[in-house]
Image (cartoon, rainbow, N blue to C red):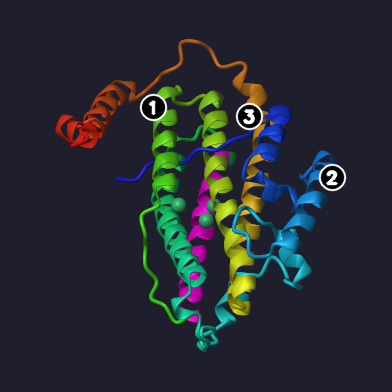
Amino acid sequence: MEKPNESSMATSKKGDETKAATAADTTSKTENNPKSGADKSDKSTTEKSETEKNSGKAAAQSTADSKANGKAAGKTGSELDSNTDNSTEDEDDSEEKPLKKFFLDALKDIYFAEHAILEALPKMRDAATTEELKDAFEDHEIVTRKQIKRLEKVFRNIGEQAEKKKCEAIEGLIKETENIIKSTPEGTMTRDAALIIAAQKTEHYEIASYGGLVQLAITLGYDKCVDLLEDTLEEEENTDYDLTDIAESFINFEALNDDAEADYGEDDESEDYEDEAYEEEYDEEEYEESTSYH
Ligand code: FE
Ligand code: FE
Ligand code: FE
């Protein structure tokens, strides 16, 4: 059973700090983003040049780097569909190399994550209070379906089967989102403010993942994969900015007016859920096994 997302930073000033401190390193480098503030530009420049020196580094490398490689942004669905070249890019001897294997594992990880997110988004939409946030989750569901297809194309391009590999991080993020839904009163702006933060945490995980994948694809010489992965990276970044926008334009402010008697809905269930999770996590036998040193 999948759980919803979570994210950071919906709040205005705080949000910017969070952005600077997390996967948003990537975000901050996006040059075409109207919402990436001037405060990030210095950091951007420094990190960018470092990345250029180390194009093989996996962590949170950004769109700006990719742009330096002449990539276009914002392709439409039909442009995506028209990319039907079935030739593979993996015709050299890199098959056995650890970096190629790592790239493939990372693809499988995000392929798993996208499916988990796809399952969580309708629950997040149902839990949201405002039409604006419901629409944002609905739109991202459509985008996520497209991203899954795009990942399948990436797998094909390197001559591999599309496969999922369990991503513990996304499961944790989704579990947190479910807990947020249970711990915020239904029908309130507080619920939406919290959901936005949860969703943004997920977006940042995706941004870091795709940023790294783009750079690895460049390093490995998988040019077609670079284009595909960059398109998705850009969509995740745009989603992140849109969520910030919704939060800052009115949701956070209106959440101040939520009253204390709001309805917590399914709160009763959350206790059971936590007990269950606790038992699962702290199975006594397993615990003893893992702590005995003989
Ligand atoms: Fe995605
Ligand atoms: Fe993961
Ligand atoms: Fe996303």
- Relative side of 251 to 68, left or right: left
Q: How far apart are marks 3 and 1 (CA)?
A: 19 Å
Q: How crowded is mark 1: few (under 14 residues within 10 Å), some or many (20 or more)?
A: many
Look at label 3 and name its amino acid: Ile
Magenta-span inclusion, residue 199: no
Question: In the structure shown, which secondary structural element does the residue marked by tag 2 occupy?
Answer: helix
The range drawn in magenta is 133-157
- For residue 42, the mark is 2
Question: In the structure shown, which secondary structural element does the residue marked by tag 1 occupy?
Answer: helix
Q: Residues within 10 Å of mark 2 (few under 14, many from 20)?
A: few
- The residue to which callout 1 is attached is 182
293 to 186, vertically: above or below: below
- The residue to which callout 3 is attached is 251
Q: Which of 190 and 175 is in front in this view?
A: 175
Look at label 1 and name its amino acid: Lys
Q: Distance between the residues labelled 2 and 3?
A: 30 Å
Magenta-span inclusion, residue 143: yes
In contact (CB < 8 Å): disc 1 and disc 2: no
- For residue 163, the mark is none
Report the residue at 56% width, 36% height from top: 196
Q: Main secondary structure of the magenta part?
A: helix
Location of residue 30 by image quarter = bottom right
Q: Distance between the residues labelled 1 and 2?
A: 40 Å
In contact (CB < 8 Å): disc 2 and disc 3: no
Look at label 2 and name its amino acid: Asp
- Residue 141: where, in percent of width, then height? 49, 54
